[in-house]
Amino acid sequence: MRRRTFCAGGLAALGAASIPFHRALAADGGADIPAVGLDGRELTLKSADIQDLRAGLRGELITVAHPDYASARRLWNPAFDRHPSLIVRCAGAADVRRAVSFSGARGLLTAVRAGGHSVSGQSGCDRGLVIDLSRMRAVEVDPVAKLARVEAGALLGELDREALAFGLATPVGTVADTGVAGLTLGGGVGRLARKFGLTCDNLVAAELVTADGEWQRASATENADLFWALRGGGGNFGVVTSFTFRLHEVTPVMYGGNLQFPITGGREMLRSLGDIIAAAPDELYVDVAMGTAPENVRWLAFNVCYCGPPGEAERVVGPLRKLGKPLEDTLAATPYDRLQGSGDLRGLSPLGAYGKGGLVYGITPALVDVMVGATESAPSDGLTMWLQHQGGAISRVPPKASAYFNRGASHNVGVFDSWQMSAADVERRTEWVRHTWTQIEPLTRGQYVNLAATDDRETRVHAAYGDNYPRLAALKKRYDPNNLFRLNANIKPA
């Protein structure tokens, strides 16, 4: 009797405790929700349809009334303040299928967030649906087959740590808290790319959900045309849920770090650097950066990684030290994962940011004069410009072997500014970047997809894909005829 009384009382208490939960659900999804379509028209998302979507998810559906909405909608770059109508936090590919089918059936404006490191703000949208894969972060390494299967929400550092435990790596970017998905789909330039190729060159297979809500596997032998498009075509062809990468044997401790100089003498150093890297082995990677800091400091830095035989490191890197008298010299034997993590911001950026980028085919005197001159005259204390080292194995892949076309570029060049958020700063800083870019852009040819900005002209987007654009547009028509996946360096259906 006592047991029955206890159970009855417990059930009553559980029922009473669940009332606020049910009320929260009603508040979160009990009303119709206004939204916007792909063509900008006003839509109304019916309460019953929203509840059906929620009921079919293993993950979470977040609306404006949800207590986590403010944090869930926040983008890495706070310069973009997006307010989506719905956010689907996916737990797996089945959730992605449901979210894509829901959006596609209604022509709903759709953004895709993977690792979330979107400087251009396109992993969010206003009054649309965000498909959020950031909690899908599993990384599985097969050290015998030398393969890694990586879910789309994983960050570079997570992939690096798992692979390095077995003395393996695949070439990825240079900032460990960057998302694997966006980097790979746009190409993927990083410290090991001159030795092993772009990230997308090391992609063996991908699993994705296309605009019709269907799950697909793409590889050299399955949906080979789709596999071709994913390697450099950006997020245009579907929501990739997992990637399988080829891994390479590496020495976990490499040789690298920073050489930092005052900007004085920068022109001479950069011209000499061009001669050094023209003769450099594939194992040497040298990023150039220059910028401004508080108290009117103007600096030039080389970020170095040498992944070749340790006994050759000093000989190969030594000429860089002779370029000038550095303010800082941290070149030493260093764990690769520490080099990869040296630029991390750890979580969401506290600073607004805006940038422009393109590709160059040599460190020319004209380019050096413009970049150093802009650094010397810049009013900002958050400006950075860079020349990211390419060439090597990247350039030996035929341009039409994958969607990534601009194989011959020696560097990608960027102009970037960051600031403490205020309305006045946004306008002033972005205008400075645009003005500086007008001087650099004529010296570029082509564009790196991962540096595309939302305000790029249509011709700039075409330049990212070069002669591969017509084939990509035809595939876009086949896999995404309504251009559901348009918040990217967008390829319009043919």
Image (tube, rainbow, N blue to C red):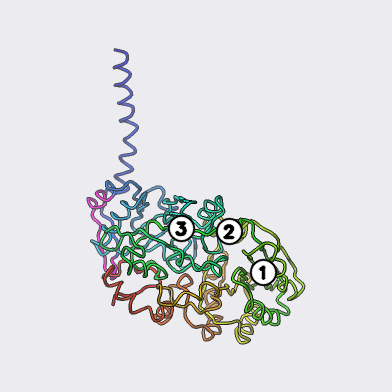
Question: Who's the residue at 45% across and 59% down the image?
Answer: 245
SS at badge 1: strand
Q: Which residue is mark 2?
A: 250
Q: Is residue 135 left or right of residue 2?
A: right
* Picture mark count: 3
Q: Is residue 331 left or right of residue 339?
A: right
Q: Is residue 130 above or below residue 9?
A: below
Q: Is residue 118 above or below residue 298?
A: above
Nearest the viewer among 208 and 14 is: 208
Q: Which residue is mark 1?
A: 293
SS at badge 3: loop
Q: Residues within 10 Å of mark 3 (few under 14, many from 20)?
A: many
Magenta includes 43?
A: yes
Q: Which residue is mark 3?
A: 115
Q: Earlier in the sequence, mark 1 or mark 2?
A: 2
* Relative image position of residue 18 (x, y in whole percent): 33, 34
Marks 1 and 3 close (CB-CB < 8 Å): no
Q: Residues within 10 Å of mark 2 (few under 14, many from 20)?
A: some
Amino acid tagged 2: Val
Amino acid tagged 1: Ala
Nearest the viewer among 125 and 344 is: 344
Q: Residues within 10 Å of mark 1 (few under 14, many from 20)?
A: few
Decide if residue 231 is in sight here: yes
* Relative image position of residue 110 (x, y in whole percent): 33, 63
Q: CA distance from mark 1 to mark 2?
A: 36 Å
Q: Earlier in the sequence, mark 1 or mark 3?
A: 3
In the rendered structure, which segment of residues is drawn in magenta? Answer: 37-53
